[in-house]
Amino acid sequence: MSPYVYPVIKTAEIETTFSELAEQWRCEIGMLSVVSKISMHPAYQRIIGMGQPPV
């Protein structure tokens, strides 16, 4: 079984997408303290779905 190969995405695209999603997440979550709602937010899930490249 071969390891997963991430699609080639320009670093600038990754940074832009991550920044936009992170800002959306921060704005929409605000002072919410319910971990399940914070972690299930669509923007947060998309960040996680980006995989290793943003790290």
Image (tube, rainbow, N blue to C red):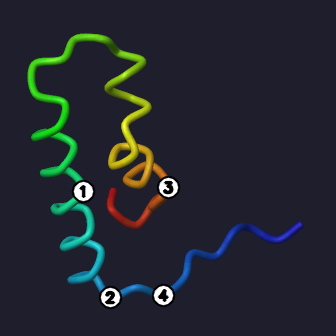
Tag 2: amino acid: Lys
Q: Are marks 2 and 1 in contact (CB under 8 Å)?
A: no
> Which percent across, then down, holds residue 27?
10, 40
Q: Which residue is mark 3?
A: 49
Q: Which label sits on residue 10?
A: 2
Q: Earlier in the sequence, mark 1 or mark 4?
A: 4
Q: Is residue 16 above or below residue 30?
A: below
Q: Alpha-carbon neighbours of circle 2 within 10 Å: few (<14), some, or many (≥20)?
A: few
- Residue 30 found in image quarter: top left
Q: Secondary structure at mark 2?
A: loop
Q: Residue at coordinates 39% horizontally, 29% vertically from top-left? A: 39
Q: Are marks 4 and 2 in contact (CB under 8 Å)?
A: yes
Q: Earlier in the sequence, mark 2 or mark 1?
A: 2
The residue mark sitting in front, 4 or 3, is: 3
| Quarter of the image where the N terminus is located | bottom right
Q: Earlier in the sequence, mark 3 or mark 1?
A: 1
Q: Which residue is mark 1?
A: 21
Q: Which residue is mark 4?
A: 8
- Residue 32 found in image quarter: top left
3 relative to 44 in the view: left or right: right
Tag 3: amino acid: Gly
Q: Residue at coordinates 17% horizontally, 37% vertically from top-left? A: 28
The residue mark sitting in front, 3 or 2, is: 3
46 relative to 4 in the view: left or right: left
Q: Secondary structure at mark 1?
A: helix
Q: Is residue 11 above or below residue 18?
A: below
The residue mark sitting in front, 2 or 1, is: 1
Q: Earlier in the sequence, mark 3 or mark 2?
A: 2
Tag 4: amino acid: Val
Q: Is residue 21 above or below residue 14?
A: above
> Which percent across, then down, holds residue 43?
33, 49
